[in-house]
């Protein structure tokens, strides 16, 4: 998800080149120059959402000259501001310096395996799940104190990789490197004249029994922020008693249901963490932000879903349009994504990611002014005729994927990316809140302007057709759709992202079209939408849904026609199907590349290159942005020409 410009510098650099802004158009922010006027006449007979073209194409489609009122296409973005697009916890955490907390041994291999037998030696106190939860409870409590202004220093959990290390570089100097047990028990004196001892922040310990009641760990994560206490297990308790700690809460026999009954009034309901038992990730985020946490299974990956009913109650308790961070194991993703969507929330795959509190520190004030690379639609040769197609890569909504070096080195940075003009799904709206420097880096290293960055799903993983259809959210679906659409619009407009990517259970449903219209209504800089169906991804079969924006232009939502998915399709098979089905000239279709699939020992954009090799010269791969504009010119030529006359 280069160093981060300070908020003031970012805004001053951007605003210094901005002309007098026009009135607010949408998304709650002001455009840097003008807006493109709507069509001077109504489009043709077919209205938005109809299958047929809105106005009939002429024999040729020359790009009209720019009019006297034309604005620079690349100026069509909004200045950086807080326009209501942020929804993750942020009270301005800004550490003056930080401790790095280190885990026992050379890695984290046994971090989610509890120690199972006593006695536990002092050397083992920083190992196993017991040591990992201790580490995360200390980290969460210290970072909360730093954010609240009662302690000037924070804690970073040791983690490598460029995505993490560029964020770590924004945290000020490192005080030192210590284990969790050392930080919990030692006096450190002063550093630069200030006391850096952290144990003074802890009122005691919350007791777990990880072997006999794995769920006690998640109960303890909530109790930890309620009682300002570190998490200690029954097997390691003696060491903390010896260090002078006393128990503040006994979670050994508590269930998650008990925790919700006891503590929900003490939890912030603007965000939720969903994580399995027998894991430690994100407990620091729960504690630092006073959140609740849910596990569906009472035993790791068991598939029992014992807490599914409780999960729905918690979802109904959350504020509308909240983020659910994490994942569950041993059940299909739809088991927890669909309820979150129905209750009006967005899931973010982030279970194996780290340091969320620190990577997201003070993110509102660290917004980079970086713009996505785009092509000027005036530069397209619309007279050329071919079977046009565009490929795009899945799983960019997966935060833990796009923050890693693996994503850059094995996907985003492949030499085949610009050659194949592959578009990338990226959950940029979540990324810019959780890791602003990673967001800046990914936009700066975008493979080319023809590798379109598509904002994915609008804030997390949910289905636009069943979003906000259950519980208290059902009565407020229109408003909740408007909220997520306005957030998404503000974010996209400020960073010049022109294409939105969405998912639905049934792309042909009226509820899907209602949601699509909300996104189009919110953003008159939105050029097009791409869409996949949950199962199968190409369930829309390439159908184009037209939606009219408030400026009067028809915006296409292009559903996916073909998919490259190992075990389901092959590049040669997809190429054959394309040659059979794409008969009209020109034609326009999209192909989704499953990011985890390999063909001929190749993956990602290398697979798109394999597909190119199977197709004749009559097929031409273009960027997703170009495909959208070619479709608009083919099916809405008059209004598209008029739009082009207003830009330069």
Image (cartoon, rainbow, N blue to C red):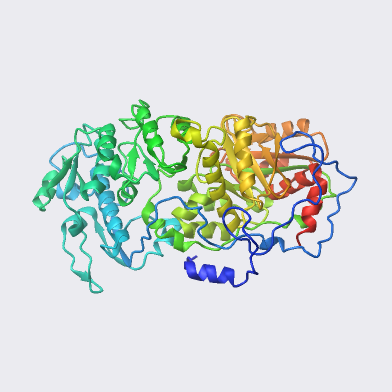
Picture residue at 72% right of the left edge, 46% below the top: 628
Work out whether 79 lies above or below 59. below
- Where residue 637 appears, as percent x and y from the top left, is 82, 46
Task: Using the image, determine if residue 258 lies above or below residue 7.
Answer: above
| Residue 138 seen by the camera | yes
Indicate the quadrant where residue 32 lies: bottom right
Number of callouts: 0
Q: Nearer the viewer, residue 551 or 412?
A: 551
Res 584 quadrant in image:
top right
Q: Is residue 216 above or below residue 268?
A: above
Q: Position of residue 534 (x, y in %)?
A: 56, 32
**Nearest the eye: 124 or 336:** 336
In the shown orientation, is residue 241 left or right of residue 582?
Answer: left
Tell me: 270 left or right of 615: left
Q: Residue at x 53, y 45 (%)?
A: 483
Q: Is residue 553 left or right of residue 95?
A: right
Quadrant of res 515: top right
- From the top left corner, tell me how far across and down residue 561 is, in percent: 68, 34
Which image quarter is the C terminus in? bottom right
Residue shown at the point (45%, 63%) measured from the top left: 365
Residue 645: x, y in percent? Answer: 80, 58
- On the question of residue 396 being in view, the answer is no
């Amino acid at each position: 998800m280069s160093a981060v410009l300070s908020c003031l510098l970012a805004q001053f650099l951007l605003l210094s080149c901005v002309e007098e802004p026009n009135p607010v158009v949408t998304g709650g922010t002001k455009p840097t120059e003008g807006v493109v006027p709507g069509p001077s006449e109504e489009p043709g007979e077919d209205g938005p959402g109809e299958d047929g073209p809105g106005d009939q194409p002429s024999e040729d489609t020359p790009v009209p000259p720019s009019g006297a009122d034309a604005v620079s296409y690349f100026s069509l973005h909004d200045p950086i501001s807080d326009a209501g697009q942020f929804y993750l916890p942020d009270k301005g955490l800004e550490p003056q310096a930080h401790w790095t907390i280190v885990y026992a041994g050379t890695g984290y291999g046994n971090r989610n395996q509890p120690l199972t037998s006593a006695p536990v030696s002092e050397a083992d106190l920083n190992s196993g799940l017991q040591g990992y939860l201790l580490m995360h409870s200390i980290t969460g409590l210290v970072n909360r104190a730093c954010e609240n202004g009662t302690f000037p220093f924070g804690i970073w959990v040791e983690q490598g990789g460029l995505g993490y290390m560029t964020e770590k570089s924004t945290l000020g100097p490192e005080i030192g490197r210590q284990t969790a047990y050392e930080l919990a028990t030692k006096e450190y004196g002063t550093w630069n004249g200030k006391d850096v001892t952290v144990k003074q922040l802890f009122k005691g310990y919350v007791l777990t029994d990880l072997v006999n009641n794995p769920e006690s760990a998640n109960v303890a994560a909530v109790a930890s922020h309620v009682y300002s206490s570190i998490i200690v297990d029954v097997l390691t308790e003696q060491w903390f008693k010896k260090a002078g700690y006393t128990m503040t809460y006994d979670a050994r026999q508590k269930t998650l249901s008990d925790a919700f009954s006891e503590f929900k009034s003490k939890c912030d309901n603007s965000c939720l963490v969903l994580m399995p038992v027998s894991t430690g990730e994100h407990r620091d985020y729960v504690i630092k932000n006073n959140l609740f946490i849910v596990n569906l299974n009472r035993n790791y990956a068991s598939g029992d879903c014992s807490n599914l009913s409780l999960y729905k109650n918690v979802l109904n308790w959350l504020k509308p349009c909240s983020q659910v961070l994490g994942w569950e194991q041993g059940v299909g993703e739809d088991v927890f994504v669909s309820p979150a969507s129905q209750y009006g929330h967005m899931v973010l795959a982030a279970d194996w990611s780290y340091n969320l509190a620190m990577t997201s520190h003070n993110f509102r004030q660290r917004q980079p002014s970086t713009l996505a690379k785009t092509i000027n639609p005036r530069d397209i040769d619309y007279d050329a005729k071919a079977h046009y197609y565009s490929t795009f890569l899945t799983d960019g909504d997966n935060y833990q994927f796009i923050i890693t070096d693996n994503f850059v080195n094995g996907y985003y940075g492949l030499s085949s990316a610009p050659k194949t003009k592959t578009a990338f799904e990226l959950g940029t709206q979540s990324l810019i809140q959780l890791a602003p420097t990673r967001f800046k880096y990914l936009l700066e290293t975008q493979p080319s302007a023809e590798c379109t960055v598509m904002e994915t799903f609008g804030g997390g993983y949910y289905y636009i057709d069943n979003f906000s259809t259950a519980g208290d959210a059902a009565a407020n679906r229109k408003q909740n759709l408007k909220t997520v659409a306005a957030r998404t619009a503000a974010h996209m407009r400020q960073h010049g992202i022109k294409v939105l990517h969405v998912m639905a259970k049934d792309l042909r449903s009226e509820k899907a079209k209602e949601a699509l219209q909300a996104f189009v209504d919110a953003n008159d800089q939105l050029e097009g939408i791409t869409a996949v169906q949950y199962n199968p991804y190409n369930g829309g079969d390439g159908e184009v849904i037209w939606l009219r924006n408030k400026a009067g232009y028809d915006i296409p939502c292009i559903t996916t026609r073909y998919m490259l998915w190992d075990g389901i399709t092959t590049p040669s098979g997809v190429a054959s199907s394309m040659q059979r089905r794409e008969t009209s000239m020109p034609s326009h279709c999209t192909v989704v590349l499953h990011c985890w699939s390999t063909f001929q020992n190749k993956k990602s954009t290398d697979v798109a290159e394999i597909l190119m090799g199977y197709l004749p010269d009559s097929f031409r791969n273009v960027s997703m942005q170009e495909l959208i504009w070619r479709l608009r010119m083919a099916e809405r030529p008059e209004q598209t020409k008029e739009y082009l006359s207003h830009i330069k």
